[in-house]
Image (cartoon, rainbow, N blue to C red):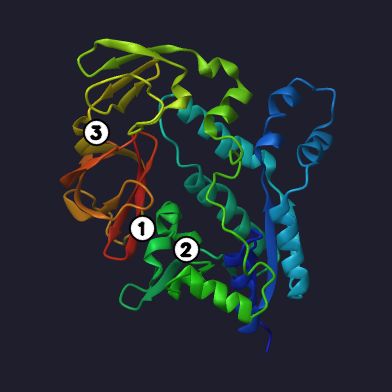
């Protein structure tokens, strides 16, 4: 009997390597795929390269990746040790065009982007599935802590939170489509702790069993998002004024890319109460600050809705929402608002930032999400 073929997205970390090993032991024909995307040193060349039209595009693509990337080598080494076939494919240009350009655009418009969500939907899972179809693989798997549960009544594969609630990554996958979900496997979804993964990895002799997990955005990890954006275009660090909620000028800021809604540190204005960034007005290059109470909101609008439930009627739909990773889902109601959706929270929440993702839940099931405006 022919083995089922599965493509495993291997990032070089313990989760994806353990996933590959588990599926190999379950009898799958495993092919590891690592996507070469980018890092800040490589992307900093982008502006310079754009002016060098005499250099063939193939050469420029190769040059973008002439700096060793440790995670790729870790994935290669792990696959080799586990005797898993492995390939590395270059999607730096696509990542730049879809993820990084949107990331820069959001910050320069005073928004707080969610680049990992965009990357998962439009780059990582898109290309993992494309490659799976190309090599006629049956499934795609990653090391995310989420679950796929088949609903016998609706004959639908549902995306659910992982049992490792502290490390649940369903928020980042809530913009995946049903077609994508139908192709996916998440072997770590039933694990309840990261320690459980590491212990199994050690038992299975996974090479990256004790590798430290990265918590940074991959292309800004060294210096942070503001320095990364300023490196691309220093005009985005233009000074402007800081005002309070009554319009009174309090001081100057050093460029809106250094600020996000809800931020407290870095405002550098003496005040009897702690001040937070309440709003960023990119058009006037103004930061509005105020006391913590001004951060709380009960309603906000969403655009570009992704809806995964069979029923498509969002009007007066009661569910739970997350407005940031790490937050517990809170009760809310959705209401149609032209081509957008109004979210009405049962209780006001703090720091709802334009550009961030709002993910929808019904208990543990992910129902989709939308972008806060």
Can the viewer see residue 243?
A: yes
How many angstroms separate mark 2 from mark 3 (CA)?
Answer: 35 Å
Q: Position of residue 11 (x, y in %)?
A: 64, 58
Query: Residue 1 appears in which quarter of the rendering?
Result: bottom right
User: How much space separates mark 1 and mark 3, taking CA atoms?
Assistant: 30 Å
Indicate which disc, 2 or 1, sits on the residue closer to the N terminus. Answer: 2
Q: Quadrant of residue 28?
A: bottom right
Mark 2 vs mark 3: in front: 3
Q: Residues within 10 Å of mark 3 (few under 14, many from 20)?
A: many
Q: Is residue 187 visible?
A: no
Callout 2–callout 1 Cβ contact below 8 Å: yes
Secondary-structure class at tag 1: loop
Contact between marks 1 and 3 (CB within 8 A): the answer is no
Please say if 271 is above or below 210.
Answer: above
Q: Which residue is mark 3?
A: 295
Query: Observer-nearest residue: 297 or 7?
Result: 297
Residues at marks 2 and 1, CA–CA distance in whole angstroms:
10 Å
> Please, is residue 146 above or below residue 368 in the view?
below
Task: Quickly name the residue at label 1.
Answer: 308
State the residue lying farthest toward the top.
249
Q: Which residue is mark 2?
A: 181
Dot 2 and dot 3 residues touching (CB under 8 Å): no
Q: Is residue 10 left or right of residue 241?
A: right
């Amino acid at each position: 009997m022919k083995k089922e073929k599965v493509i495993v997205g291997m990032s070089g970390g313990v989760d994806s390597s353990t996933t590959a090993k588990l599926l190999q032991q379950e009898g799958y024909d495993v092919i590891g795929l690592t996507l070469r995307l980018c890092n800040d040193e490589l992307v900093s060349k982008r502006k310079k390269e754009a002016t060098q039209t005499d250099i063939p595009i193939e050469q420029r693509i190769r040059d973008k990746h002439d700096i060793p990337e440790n995670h790729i080598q870790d994935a290669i080494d792990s696959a080799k040790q586990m005797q898993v076939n492995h390939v590395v494919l270059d999607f730096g240009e696509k990542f730049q065009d879809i993820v990084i350009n949107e990331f820069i655009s959001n910050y320069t418009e005073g928004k707080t982007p969610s680049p990992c969500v965009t990357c998962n939907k439009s780059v990582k899972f898109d290309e993992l599935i494309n490659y799976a179809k190309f090599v006629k693989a049956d499934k795609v798997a990653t090391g995310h802590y989420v679950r796929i549960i088949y609903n016998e009544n609706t004959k639908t594969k549902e995306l659910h939170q992982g049992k490792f609630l502290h490390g649940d990554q369903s928020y980042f996958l809530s913009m995946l489509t049903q077609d994508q979900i139908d192709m996916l496997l998440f072997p770590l979804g039933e694990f309840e702790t990261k320690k459980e993964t590491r212990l199994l990895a050690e038992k299975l002799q996974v090479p990256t069993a004790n590798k430290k997990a990265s918590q940074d955005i991959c292309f800004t990890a060294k210096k942070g998002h503001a320095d990364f954006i300023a490196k691309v275009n220093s005009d985005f660090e233009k000074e402007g004024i800081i005002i309070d909620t009554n319009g009174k000028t309090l001081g100057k800021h050093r460029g809106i890319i250094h600020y996000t809604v809800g931020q407290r540190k870095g405002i550098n204005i003496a005040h009897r109460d702690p001040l937070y960034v309440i709003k960023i007005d990119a058009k006037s290059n103004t930061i509005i600050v105020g006391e913590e109470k001004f951060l709380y909101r009960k309603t906000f609008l969403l655009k570009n809705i992704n809806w995964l439930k069979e029923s498509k009627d969002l009007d007066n739909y009661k569910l739970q929402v997350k407005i940031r990773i790490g937050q517990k889902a809170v009760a809310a109601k959705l209401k149609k608002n032209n081509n957008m959706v109004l979210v009405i929270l049962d209780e006001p929440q703090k720091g709802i930032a334009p550009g961030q993702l709002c993910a929808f839940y019904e208990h543990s099931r992910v129902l989709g999400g939308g972008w806060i405006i």
